[in-house]
Image (tube, grey):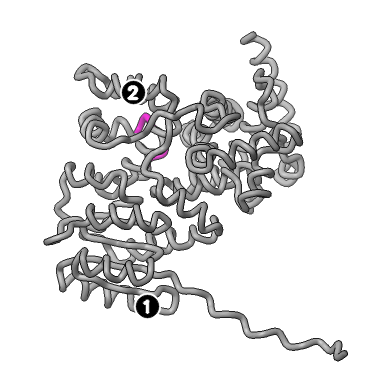
Amino acid sequence: MNTATQPSPPAAPATKTRILFVDDEPSMIRVLKMGMRPMVNEWDLHFAESGEEALALIGHQPFDVVVTDMRMSGMNGAQLLTHVMRQHPQTVRIVLSGYADLSEVVSCVGLTHQFLTKPCSLEDLKNCLKRVTGMKQQLGHEKLRALTGGMANLPSLPKLYLEIAEALQSPMSSTERIADIAARDPALSAKLLQLSNSAFFGFSRRVFSVAEAVQLLGVGVIQSIALAVPLFSAFDHHKCPGFHLEQVWDHSVETGVIACRIYNHHLDDSHRAEQAFAAGVLHDVGKLILAEKLSDQYSEIIQESHATKLPLHEVERKHLGASHAEVGAYLLALWGLPVPLVEAVACHHNPRRCANHNLCLAGVIHIADALQHAGSAQPDALPTRVDVDYLKYIGMEADYEIWRKEHQEKNRESV
């Protein structure tokens, strides 16, 4: 038998990302064709001048990204994206449109991952497409991308669901009251941050906090959207045995509070404190997606985590090929949330992935997450451990001990 080393077969060419642009203005199609020409080696580009033509192309072979105008003769952008969402939920859906009013935004809130306004520079459009196409590598499992891409909203606690619904229907509601409720709800927090970071509203800066999002959007806009489309949905606690939404909510908010305290009292950075609270509230949104979309399988994963005393994210990765951290970060990135928040969610179990020698936002969320779990009074709280090697890597073992003792003392005082 010939044991000589055989030459390896040539590597298969990487599949290009398929992107479809849809606009009924021939002049706009010409601009897009010329502007996107430098990307032909990376992207497989297609163009359609109507929704009907786009559907024919999509029916032949699905696309990774669809970028569509909103106002078109015949089938409009919302109708096109409705079909795409139902038939190909893994496809990233982007609206690139001018002359939009609030009613048009409302019609595509649950259909669109990102909303860009004309005029939009070709460089900004390319950067947006690079970000969303690059996310595919972060969540390699096609099934997980499909179920995450198909999420129009996230489930909420029935109690908060009713509370925010009542507040939004009341003509006397203030931004402070709505912000207070929303800040305790990861589902609504994520949706409001998605809307406030949308190019449609034209805010000059990235929005990191729910309070700022509510202030900028205004009660009237939020009421209009909430009354027309479901921003969130009540979660059926019978759907996924072993998954307790109340615990996820409490843990998420408490993690945000701890992270905020670390920045305010130990790192003297009040600006990052607001980001830290939002990141803490959002860090486990991936659990909501898995519990909602993979209820039976996720229930078994939770049971295995309890039985083996292994951290939930390790059991998730064993069975799904990814953890709730990557799943949640993928959705938030699709929704266009600021990169630091997405990175903090993605890396909160392994902050060394950020390749930052200093304490970064993901590291603070990792520490706050571990501190909250360590001090939890819930008898069935899932185990989470701080990464000691990470603390050594950034030289903060002593600081962590100070924060741990402080957190223990606060827990004793609250008993």
Looking at the rendered image, the disc whose residue lies closer to the viewer, 2 or 1, is 2
Q: Quadrant of the C terminus?
A: top right
Q: Count all numbered tags in the image, as a single digit.
A: 2
At label 1, the amino acid type is Pro
Residue occupied by mark 1: 38
The residue labelled by disc 2 is 164
Secondary element type, mark 2: helix
Q: Residue at x 38, y 27 (%)?
A: 182
Q: Which residues are magenta?
A: 207-212
Q: Is residue 357 magenta?
A: no
User: Marks 2 and 1, how far apart in space?
Assistant: 47 Å
Provide residue 396's location: percent of width, then percent of height: 71, 38
Residue 161 appears left or right of 174? right
Residue 3 percent across, percent down from the top left: 86, 87
Other residues around mark 2 within 10 Å, as few (<14) / some (14–19) / many (≥20)? many
- Relative to residue 325, is residue 267 depicted above or below? above
Indicate the amino acid at tag 2.
Answer: Ile
Q: Secondary structure at mark 1?
A: helix
